[in-house]
Amino acid sequence: MAMAKEFLGSSLMEKSSFVSPASGVLFNHRFNQKQNNNLSFSPVLVPLEKRRLHSRKSASVPVATISEDLVKLVVPEKPVKFKVRAVVTVRRKNKEDLKETIVKHLDDFTDKIGRNVALQLVSSEIDPKTKAPKKSTQAALNWSKKSKVRAERVHYTAELTVDSNFGEPGAITVSNKHQNEFFLETITIEGFACGPVHFVCNSWVQSKKDHPGNRIFFSNKPYLPSETPTGLRELREKELKELRGNGKGTRKASDRVYDYDTYNDLGNPDKGIDFARITLGGEEIPYPRRCRTGRPPTDTDMKAESRIEKPFPIYVPRDEAFEESKQNTFAAGRLKAVLHNLIPSLITSLSADNHDFKGFADVDSLYKEGLRLKVGLQDGLLKKLPLPQVMSQGLLRYDTPRILTKDKFAWLRDDEFARQAMAGINPVNIERLEVFPPVSKLDPAIHGPPESAIKEEHIVGHIEGMSVPQALEEKRLFMLDFHDIYLPFLDKINALDGRKAYATRTLFFLTRLGTLKPIAIELSLPFTASTSSSSSKRVLTPPVDATSNWIWQLGKAHVCSNDAGVHQLVNHWLRTHACMEPFILAAHRQLSEMHPIFKLLDPHMRYTLEINALARQTLISAGGVIESCFTPGQYCMEMSAAAYRDFWRFDLEGLPADLLRRGMAVEDPTKPHGLKLVIEDYPYANDGLLIWSAIESWVRTYVNRYYPDSSLIRSDIELQSWYSEAVNVGHANLRHQNWWPNLTNTEELTSILTTLIWLASAQHAALNFGQYPYGGYVPNRPPLMRRLIPVQGDSDYDYFMADPQRFFFSALPSLLQSTQFMAVVDTLSTHSPDEEYIGERQQPSIWSGDADIVEAFYGFSAEMQRVEKEIEKRNKDPSLRNRCGAGVLPYELLAPSSEPGVTCRGVPNSVSI
């Protein structure tokens, strides 16, 4: 018995094995049997490079080995007690309000009299006597002793007593009897023979006064449901049940409940009929589901959820909210400043005769001189603005957008207009023209003849002497087609005050240099019985004189306005924000945190629910920024919903499938990615395929690790429930579509997961972080247009002829609309200091207890570094004219890393802004 106590006692067990950084070895403890049957303990050095990787379920930590002779020798008659040490890392807030400070001091005091933070270990094994999991004693943290520590991360300790037959720890419960919540990063248990046991928490632990139950955290070992140790099965089910909630009641800010609801909270009918909005995702209009808040209905419409306006927070599960540094970045952004402080003052500051830009000099002055506010505003306004660029004397200056930094006039050129279709902020709409003339898919009985008005005579002089059939056969004709998404809404849009739009098609020709040039723009208005098809459709071709040059510039502006709307409402918001949310909700509801697939997806779900909730509150709501700044106005979200109904398909959201759908690539098994790009120098596709392939390889390695046989996928109840719920509940309106992928084998799972990670990381980055660098100069990408293009005989044709520049700017957004839009996209293009980029993870060495997988992830990280170097190399290659040349911006939107701020590069793991 004495020998057993010596072996299992805390004095030895607390001397767990550690890595010696200086020597590069592991300490492995060996026990030797002496002649007198006493035991001696001697360390043996094992070189790190010779260590054997542990099995799938083992942690990447040193292990204390026990010889077989010892096992035979020491067989205690009954279990003995020994102590293990818990090291708990808590991250404190950098800034506390007065209430939090007072409560903190109160907690420090009451901690000494038993209102403390306590831990209890739970074994992976069942006690045969109680038929319940084995548990340690409960132990309190030494909280009050660290009350004066000012560090951001504070390490607390506690000693827990366990039996010698406790088995391997699998979970730990945390009880918080303080008044304040606290953010728990990690818990490490030292003293077990298996080595340190890690619990990666990254979660807010609420006070018992708000949530009476104890919090459950599982160790970092991944387990499929069927492999769950007996001692953890009940806890695994209990934790998921709590996360699902019961679908009732109003959610509190401290809740951790994930549930679904429709988009019935965008309008505010209590403010009047102009603020009422139809429900998206209901019976009438299909849309993905969003996170349920449970707020009561409005007084006016029982089907509409009441709104919470800024500065009051909208509910998201507590762990989904922005962490402090992210919150500070967002709060200090121009979005909040402009929307809630600046805009009301600007409205009163700007006189009636200076709402429009008069010329290019007025736009330039926003970056050089700043926007001058009414004298006297400084005291009441400027002191509230946390903006470094807010100057004295009532000036608000904007950073110069990147599009102006290398060639101020590049945006005016046709080649730059075409280049941005492949390397700008919306490179995912360009498609190869396969039928000439283009044909609409809309109902001709409602929208008129489907054929485009573009004829062969319009373009034959611009395609290097080729015939149209020859150009089609050689894959030299391309198109931006916004006809079908805009045309059904044009009557309503053009009836709005100060909004005018066409449904546009633009044809491009691929030159022998590998660049595109625009050769025709079609501008369509709604077809009516009283108008002929020719009068509702107008075709512009490249200019030949001064008048046609200004007409052509106005035509390109309308194309860019169409492009900006589809980019924001469909490609960006719908495809990467809204359509991801159901998969995230289902993951938290159906996948345990110990499930390997949850561990894989976890970094790619960070902050998405929070940014989507803020978007519903401020951006896409009635009267919000999107409605104010984009041509479709109050019909913006209906247009987004129409795209979801008519165009969105999950099976085509992966990069290779999307390129094939748009005819921008053809299948070629001899190529590295199995594809051959039709345009060799297509920067978004070229760089994207590098990242896609790296993600796919990493995911395939991961999936094959845990599912060596596809039958394990079919029998994984959590995995199947996750996918089924995401489709049938989260995308309920489209659940019967036959294009949803099956989930029956490893290839299907790899494809689904690769697509989700691609959308959350690289696809969102490509569509988001160039918004201010390209769109911050409004003439380059006007988000709305206020005038149609006049023809001879129109009332404003003489105005256009007399002063075309002033007419051009009167068609663009006003000064107020422009500055509001610029402020918003500046915030949306900003990386926060706590951003995690693709190839990075919190706690990179212990996020999984599977050593092989941790090492495989380091390999994925190294691949991201190689991708970045390849992108840098491509941006210096003068043969790649779409990303390198005089005044040409390099394409860096898919370069994996970035510094904080507006950088026009960087691929975060998740949709976090």
Image: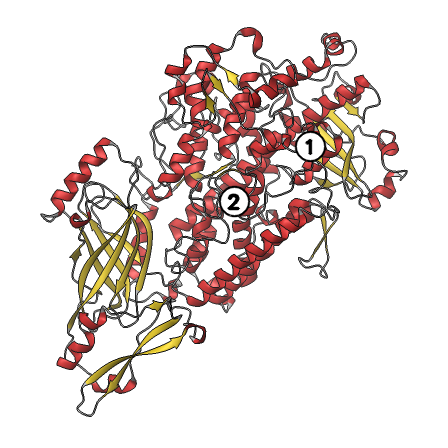
Q: Of callouts 2 and 1, which one flags the residue occurring earlier in the amino acid sequence?
A: 1
Name which residue lies at 26% across and 65% down: 190
User: Residue 605: x and y, percent?
Assistant: 44, 47
**Secondary element at image label 1:** loop
Q: Quadrant of residue 148?
A: top left
User: Residue 720: x and y, percent?
Assistant: 45, 56
Is residue 492 at least partly visible in the picture? no
User: Residue 885: x and y, percent?
Assistant: 72, 40
Q: Is 259 rendered above or below residue 312?
A: below
**Horizontally, is 884 left or right of 815 in the view?**
right
**Horizontally, is 158 left or right of 772 in the view?**
left
Residue reaching furthest to the left: 113
Q: Which residue is mark 2?
A: 898
Q: Is 260 rendered above or below residue 489?
A: below
User: Residue 621: x and y, percent?
Assistant: 46, 26
Residue type at mark 2 is Ser
Circles 2, 1 touching at the beta carbon (< 8 Å): no
Q: Which residue is mark 1?
A: 442
